Image (cartoon, rainbow, N blue to C red):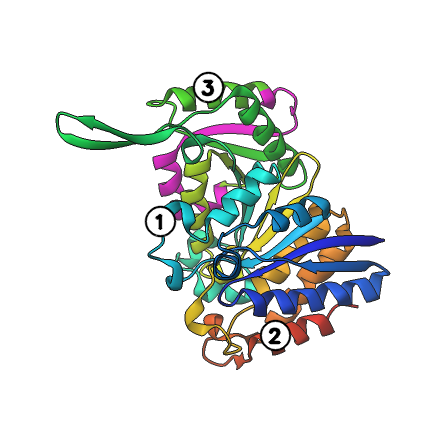
Amino acid sequence: MNFNIAVIPGDGIGPEIVEQTKYVLEKVGDVYGHKFQFTEVLAGGCAIDKMGEALPAETLEVCKKSDAVLLGAVGGYKWDNLPGNQRPEQALLGLRKGLGLYANLRPAILFDDLKDACPLKPEIIGDGLDICVVRELTGGIYFGEKGFKETELGKAAYDVEIYSEGEVERIARRAFEIARKRNKKVTSVDKANILESSRLWRSVVEKVAKEYPDVSLNHMYVDNASMQLVRNPKQFDVIVTSNMFGDILSDEASMITGSIGMLPSASLGEDNIGLYEPVHGSAPDIAGQDKANPIATILSAAMMLRYTFDLEEEADAVENAVKKVLSQNYRTEDIMSEGMILVGGKKMGELIREQIS
């Protein structure tokens, strides 16, 4: 099978981690008889420097014509003083909107060999954690009306939270479909005791839940959910929530694994075109030093194999290769601990490729 992948190396360590991920995909292709065609395009800070904008039109066009998009990272202190609408991060918003990517999937997995890095007590994490946060990506307060107005207390700013029934319905359905392949439990997080948008959210989620009688549903206010993630995280399977709440809770869920730099993500649309990227940032302070951990990006590619290309066996092979290398005590600097074997990003990529067979 042949697949066309638009590749956005981006800024900072992005080019390094993307390079190792491409090598892993090529190894998957060799072993399983697939051909991955990569087309590199610019987005983020490097695009601002070369093209004058974070998301050039030609980049979006290439992405639209591709089967999937692999992204390294965008941003960095070099562009911190630019106005908000001109920053590198605008490329992400533009890609999500331009590709119709409404569902962000962020697994928070505690690897057995990295349990010591978890900030929670052993009795809380038990035999490990595996949570999937499904965040609505194209609606809510991030995309609602915004602006300024004068008040008797001076200048005021506003951002409007708005959701339609259709937006909630499609993200809820995605969450229930994912839960069916996991532990068949969905927790919908909102603020229905205060917000009208959350009350609509809750009613639509309950309507969709009737289509999935095999999946249990419970509701939780966002403030309680943030507490429960550190008090009793094992109660969660799939969490579905709004754009802003998901932005916050997915970072918290990732951090309780103790290795935010290890975690992948996928952003999906209706036709399963996906944008796949690591959760971590561009880390410009270590760029070019072979210190960057490529595992999160490699695991993002495994999600690409599973969700966009429907290659379950190949995705399992990549994930198992990562687990095998970790079990052999190899570590990059960000996850290094006493008694482990320190390797650079290139070596880590090589070790993972060797385990794919």
Mark count: 3
Identify the residue position indicated by label 1 in the image.
83
Cα distance, mark 1 to mark 3?
Answer: 34 Å
Q: Which circle marks residue 348 in the picture? A: 2
The answer to whether residue 256 of the structure is visible from this angle is: no
Instruction: Decide which of 104, 230 is in the foreground and name it.
Output: 104
* In the image, residue 93 above or below residue 316: above
Dot placed on the residue nearer the N-terminal end, 1 or 3:
1
Q: Which residues are magenta?
A: 208-235
Question: Closer to the camera: disc 1 or disc 3?
Answer: 1
The image shows residue 34 at horizontal and vertical percentages of: 83, 58
The kind of residue on which mark 1 rests is Pro
Q: Callout 2 environment at 10 Å: few (<14), some (14 to 19), or many (20+)?
A: many
Residue located at (57% from left, 70% from top): 16
Instruction: Decide which of 242, 126 is in the foreground and name it.
Output: 242
Dot placed on the residue nearer the N-terminal end, 1 or 2:
1
The kind of residue on which mark 2 rests is Met
Cα distance, mark 1 to mark 2?
Answer: 37 Å
Q: Secondary structure at mark 2?
A: helix
Q: Callout 3 environment at 10 Å: few (<14), some (14 to 19), or many (20+)?
A: some
Residue at the left extreme of this rendering: 152
Question: Closer to the camera: disc 1 or disc 2?
Answer: 1
Cα distance, mark 2 to mark 3?
Answer: 47 Å
Q: Secondary structure at mark 1?
A: loop
The image shows residue 356 at horizontal and vertical percentages of: 75, 68
Q: Secondary structure at mark 3?
A: helix
Q: Which circle marks residue 261 in the picture? A: none
Q: Which circle marks residue 200 in the picture? A: 3
Dot placed on the residue nearer the N-terminal end, 2 or 3:
3
The kind of residue on which mark 3 rests is Leu
Q: Callout 1 environment at 10 Å: few (<14), some (14 to 19), or many (20+)?
A: few
